[in-house]
Every structure is written in C-alpha cells, then in structure tokens.
Image (cartoon, grey):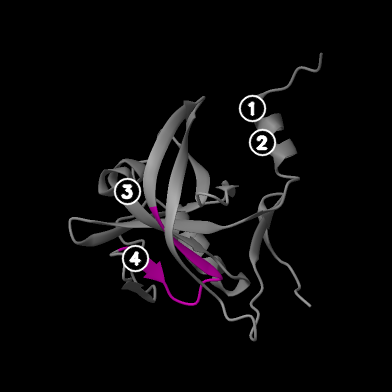
Amino acid sequence: MIVFDSRTFREALGHYASGITVIGAMVDGAPVGFTCQSFFSVSMDPPLVSFSVMKTSSRWPKVRSAGKFSINVLSATQRELADQFGRHSPENWAGIPWRVDRHDNPGIDDVLLRLDCSLTAEHEAGDHWVVIAAVEGLEHADAATPKHPLLYYRGKYHRLEVD
C-alpha cells in the first residue's frame, strides 16, 4: 500500500484538467457566489448536475438558503473572474458584468454556459458537501462564434483551443 498525505493527493489530482464555474444565487436581494471547479453532469433524464464545495465555505450556506442558483461556466477570457470569486470578499460581484436572469439568479455575461438550478440533495463527503441540482433552464454560447473554455490544470489556468 502506498502512503501519502493530503498535499500529495491534491497535487496528484491536479493532473486532471477541469473547467471553472461560478455558482451564484440572489440572497436578500444581493448576489452571492464562489468559484468551483468540481462540477459535472449526473443525469440527462431528469437533467441533473453536481458539484462539491468545502464544508468550511462561508458562501455555500448562503447559496444553499436560496434553494436555487446559477452555474456559470467560464470562458478563457474570464480568468480574472475565477480569481475574484475565489477570494473571500463581500465585493466578489464588483465590476462584474452580470444580470438577474429569468429564474431570478445572477447570470454572468459572456459565459460559455449558464445553468439555472434548484437544490435537490446535499451529501456529506469528507471535508466537502456533494450537491445535486435539478437543471431548470440553460443558456449557452452561440455555436457560430465558439469561445474557448477556461481550464484548470496542475495549479494553473489554461486555454483549450477549439477547432
């Protein structure tokens, strides 16, 4: 058996490239959000997605309380947004082009994909919560003008070239 610590485990998992999302909700009339890279689809019928968030997150309990939220998949031109929402600041939305969408969720402009979701389940998993959400609406980038996704790989942002 190989013995390793949490830092070694984290570094090893860094070899898996992932996209970057911002999870956002309206809470008491103001947007709340955080960067999340552990996002994936769960089911096509019914449409379900999932993400995980650290139990120590100060923003997830606020988003959870709304019961619904947006998942904004960032493009390669939105690195600064990923960093801004990764910081613990009440000013995460300052200077960000966004709007309240038809589902009353904060939607970031010019993302690759935005999903409007409702919370369906939350499961404890070690030091994280695994969240399951029903997709109730979506908007995605125009296929005629493809955008490049923002990826996170080995601790750095990368751009995937799209043909």
Q: Would you call the spot at circle 4 few (<14 residues within 10 Å), some (14-19), or many (20 or more)?
A: many
Residue 63's label in the rendered image is 3
Kind of residue indicated by mark 3:
Val
Q: Residue 117 sits in which quadrant?
A: bottom left
**CB under 8 Å between discs 2 and 3:** no
Q: Nearer the viewer, residue 20 or 163?
A: 163
Q: Are marks 1 and 2 in contact (CB under 8 Å)?
A: yes
Query: Closer to us: mark 2 or mark 3?
Result: 3
> Which residue matches tag 2?
10
Q: Earlier in the sequence, mark 4 or mark 3?
A: 3
Of marks 2 and 4, the one in the foreground: 4
On the rendered structure, is 53 left or right of 147? left
In 3D space, how far apart are the residues under numbered discs 2 and 3 (Cα atoms)?
26 Å
Image location (x, y in percent) of residue 6: 64, 27
Dividing the picture into quadrants, the one containing residue 99 is: bottom left
User: In this picture, which residue range is highlighted in magenta?
Assistant: 105-117
User: Which is more foreground, mark 1 or mark 4?
Assistant: 4
Secondary structure type for disc 1: helix
Q: Are marks 4 and 3 in contact (CB under 8 Å)?
A: no
**What secondary structure is marked by label 2?**
helix
Describe the element under mark 4 as helix, strand or loop: strand
Where is mark 1, residue-wise?
A: 6
